[in-house]
Amino acid sequence: MTQKDEAIRAVETLLRYIESSDTDFREGLVNTPKRVVESFDEIFSGYDMDAISILDSTFNAEGFDGIVLLRDMEFHSTCEHHLQPFSGRGHIAYIPVNRIVGISKLARLLDMHSKRLQNQERITQSIANDIVDNLKPLGCAVILEAQHGCMKCRGVKKQNAIMTTSAMRGVFFEKSEARAEVLQLIRSPPIQG
């Protein structure tokens, strides 16, 4: 039996638990175990990626020494504590020294970390660490804002609560002016287009 077959069997067990049934599945659930495992392959595809290969293609910064910010990136993840979804927006900024990276790489880095069983704090820290380790910038800032299913549909049931986490490295940690500038850029009104 393959690992995928075992996963399908595990979902069948969970469905029987939820439905309180030892009988055959009703029509709507017959193929659900296979569909769930296939969806897991996509939802948790971050385990098949690594930061080094995502950030391996860099370009000469050509003397640019300002803030590079990619903001308002949507992300979706799964809480490792209750297997509930959480999603929100991510903002990633850095100040290059010699090398810059294509902006899609920042989005891919966010996807890589969020497509794993996670907590928001770890995603935030891991992205900042990867950027510092691979790009060696003057500073790096990562801010994530998310709503958590484990807060919305169970437990305290707070529908509008937004959790914000940040990781500041280099000048964004050391210099309040740099931190204030990046926060102002993140809060600026979106482009109307």
Image (cartoon, helix red, strand yellow):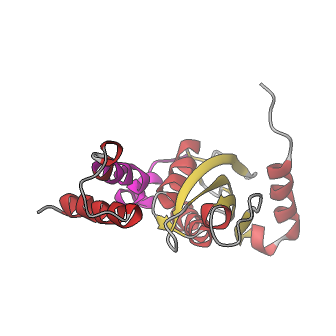
Could you say where residue 166 lies in the image, as x and y percent from the top left? 71, 68
Taking the image as shown, residue 115 lies to the left or right of residue 24, namely: right
Q: Nearer the viewer, residue 120 or 173?
A: 120
Q: Residue at x 45, y 52 (%)?
A: 54
Report if residue 35 lies within the magenta region: yes
For residue 139, above or below residue 71: below
Q: How many marks?
A: 0
Give the quarter of the image for residue 160: bottom right
Q: Residue at x 31, y 42 (%)?
A: 27
**Which residues are drawn in magenta?**
34-59
Report if residue 97 lies within the magenta region: no
Q: Residue at x 57, y 72 (%)?
A: 122
Residue 11 seen in the current view: yes
Could you say where residue 76 lies in the image, as x and y percent from the top left? 56, 53
Residue 100 seen in the current view: no
Could you tell me which quadrant the C terminus lies in? top right
Q: Residue at x 53, y 68 (%)?
A: 133
